[in-house]
Image: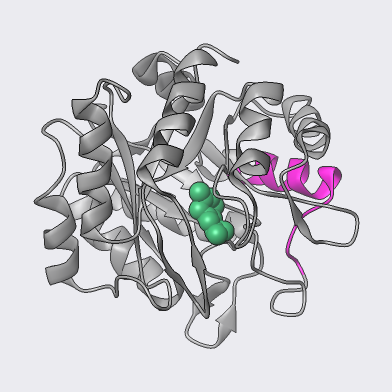
Amino acid sequence: MLKNKVILTCAPTGAETTRAEHPGLPFTPEEVAETAVAAREAGAGILHLHVRDENGISTQNPETFRKVIDAVRKQTDIVIEISTGGAVGDTPEDRLRPVFEVMPEMASLDCGSVNFGNEYIVNTLPMMREFATAFEKCHVQPTLECFDPGQIASSRQLIKEGLLKPPFFYGLAFNIRGAMPYSQASVDAMLRQLPEDADFTLVGIGRAQLPCQYLSLAIGGQLRVGFEDNIYYHKGVLAENNAQLVARATRLIREAGMEPATPAEIREYFKLSNY
Ligand code: KMH
Ligand code: ZN
């Protein structure tokens, strides 16, 4: 754990959020780059990246990732974590391709199958093994995304098999419709299962986003905000943009007597090698 520092991730786009829900949703390379710069200036150290095609539809096309990453890289040093969760219904092959072809610094590794709104996502143990093996081969640091406590057990199975190695960085998601609701009891249920010395971010969806930030700060966790998870600043009031959510998270971190970790500090901590 970084001393007196908090890793603040911005997830600006996601796969499911639409322009109908928030007209300012960034998805062209220029828009994502501009968002990344503003998020970095506001305190974010990691950009959790999903990409969209020209019609705004989620894609795992490595070429699209490359275009967006190139645009971001020209303007800011923020750590880039790509999604290998992709969108509901994406095949495992498509989800994994950008890891091989783009070789990002970090990527999400989803740790189990679960209901996701009216749909469901599939992450079997053999799939997770394949993903973990690819990550290691490409020197990609995983963020282990878990949507219920049983998924932490799945991650531990891979740790036992030597397919995941420290440092362990978990993204624990709460309030995805059909999955784990947010409550202090459900957070506890997740935390109790974590490996010793694991770092974790409480990822609050929708109205759970702000409580997750307060709770995470109180218990030594990291923070994540952004339109992938939540588009509101207050109940019923849309956030102006992603940076506004990042700026509030930074204020909370500072009120708690800490500082947001810089990209350089995050690279050093995780020993990231694909910058
Ligand atoms: N869009 C969801 C189906 C991740 O980035 O790894 C999966 C997701 C998690 O967003
Ligand atoms: Zn994601």
**What secondary structure do most residues of the magenta stretch adopt?**
helix
Tell me where the magenta segment starts and ends, as one range. 24-39
Q: Is residue 95 left or right of residue 174?
A: right
Residue 136's x, y, as percent?
Answer: 45, 18
- Which quadrant does the N terminus fall into? top left
- Which quadrant does the C terminus fall into? top right
Q: Is residue 207 left or right of residue 88?
A: left
Residue drawn at (41%, 77%) of the image: 207
Residue 264's x, y, as percent?
Answer: 48, 19
**Is 92 part of what is drawn in magenta?**
no
Q: Is residue 148 left or right of residue 73?
A: left
Residue 225's x, y, as percent?
Answer: 48, 57
Residue 23's x, y, as percent?
Answer: 77, 73
Residue 233 higher or lower than 36, as above or below: below
Residue 1 higher or lower than 257, as above or below: above
Residue drawn at (66%, 48%) of the image: 50
Count of numbered circles in the view: 0
Residue drawn at (27%, 32%) of the image: 158
